[in-house]
Every structure is written in C-alpha cells, then in structure tokens.
Amino acid sequence: MKHFFEFFPWLFSLFGMDHFAHEYHHIIFSWVAMIILILVGVLAAKTITMIPGKGQNVLEILVGGLEEFMVGVVGEEGRWFLPLAATLFLYILLCNLMGLLPGFFPPTANVNTPLSCAIVVFCFTHFLGIKHHGAKYIKHFMGPILALTPLFLILETISHFARVLSLTFRLFGNMMGHELVLMILFFLAGAFLAPLPIMAMGILVAVVQAFVFFMLSIMYFAGSIEHAH
C-alpha cells in the first residue's frame, strides 16, 4: 500500500536505486523517522534551560508522563529501562503519524517494522529476566505445580513467542486498516476532502496504537523481573 507520490523513495530513484525505493520504501521512511528523532533529541539536549521554553515543556511533559506511568506499573526499577521503552513509543508514534501526511507512508503499516520492534521487546524481556534472576528465571516457565512442569514449560514457551505475533499484528493490522480506509475515501471523495474527516481519527489511532505497544512492552518487562510463583 503506497501513496500516489512519495517524495523520499522518488529521491532515491533519482540516484539509480529504483528497485530499493519501490520495494523497501518502508525502510526509507523508517530512516526518516529515526533521523527526525535524533535531530530533535540533539537539539533538545543543546537547548535545555532552567526556565523551559515551549518545546522543552512539551518534551518534559511527554517523557515525564511516560516515566511516571512506568514507575506506577513496574516500580522504581522502571526508570532503568525508560530509554528503551520511551524510544519505542516515540518511534512508533512518529511512524504512525507519517501516514497522515501527503506523500508519506507509515512504516508501521509494513509488517517488518512492527515485527522488528516486537523482537526487540522479546529479547529485552528475557535479558531482564536473566539479569534479575539468573538461572532461576527458568521458574517463570515451570508453572506452580511441579508434576505439570513439562506441560507448563511447553505452554509458557509458546505463550512467550506468541507475544511477538500479538505485538506485531495488532500494530500492523490497525495501521494497515487505517491506510486502506484512507485509500478508499481517497477514491470516493477526492484527494483534498478524503483526509479531513478521518484526520482526527487517524491521530487518535496513531497515539493509541503506539501507547498500547508501549504499555504491553512494559508489562512484559515487569513480568520478567518479578518473582515466579
């Protein structure tokens, strides 16, 4: 699913990278999102003042709100993995919002982007579990009844791998659905009228889906560091 005119893939095609620009345009827009986040982070770090301006206020409220939410769910240990969780939230939010701009494509509407984010969450979840519990982390997969350990071991392993699919297809399905609705309205109502009725809904979907991914991720992180029953 592509918009009719995508500036960045078109720019790559000028340098003889037509195949890459058309087949992997979600990667190009993913690079754009990362560059924007890095630039905003560098500029924000250089312009920090004791009396915050409008931009610093917005960033402080956003990051502070995410941090307070994580501490409320995980406890004080939540501050340790705030950088990763907040980066995932901001990256997914920016990728989602790209779909609302003419000539842009939301990378999260391609299954590879949410899958890569889900794999990061999966790996970090088990890294946290091993870091906090060592070899005893295996108890998280053994269940409460010793005699049923082999069965729980299989079920828990499947359950943990299913989290990757759940995170991936929830985000991908919602963003792809939004793109399909946008394309249908585009054909029915025209290029200028179609985005207007669904602009507010699109912003809501982008924020909610980024927050759901963020919330599920920190719940998985919290589950890996708590003691097994």
Image (cartoon, grey):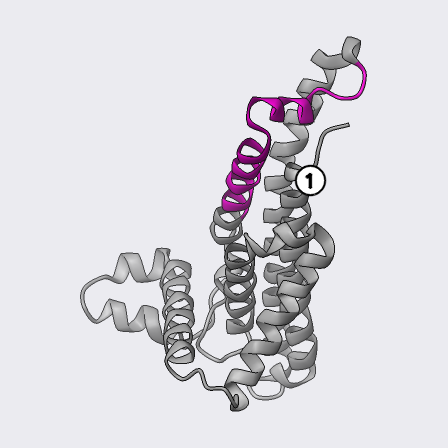
Q: Residue at x 43, y 70 (%)?
A: 37
| Most common secondary structure along the magenta stretch | helix
* Quarter holding residue 27: bottom left
Q: For residue 127: magenta?
A: yes
Kind of residue at disc 1? Gly
Horizontal side of 176 relative to 31 (left or right) equals right
Position of residue 181 relative to residue 84, above or below, is below
Q: Residue furthest front?
A: 50
Horizontal side of 182 relative to 43 (left or right) equals right
Residue 68 percent across, percent down from the top left: 67, 65
Q: For residue 182: magenta?
A: no
Q: Residue at x 73, y 58 (%)?
A: 72
Position of residue 20 relative to residue 46, above or below, is above
Residue 130 percent across, percent down from the top left: 54, 31
Q: Nearer the viewer, residue 96 or 53?
A: 53
Residue 44 percent across, percent down from the top left: 43, 79
* Quarter holding residue 57: bottom right
Report if residue 181 is visible in the image. no
In the image, the segment drawn in magenta is: 118-145
Q: Nearer the viewer, residue 47 or 151?
A: 47
Residue 3 percent across, percent down from the top left: 47, 71
Horizontal side of 11 relative to 143 (left or right) equals left
Report if residue 55 is visible in the image. yes
Q: Which residue is mark 1?
A: 223
Q: Residue at x 25, y 67 (%)?
A: 13
Position of residue 24 relative to residue 200, above or below, is above
Q: Secondary structure at mark 1?
A: helix
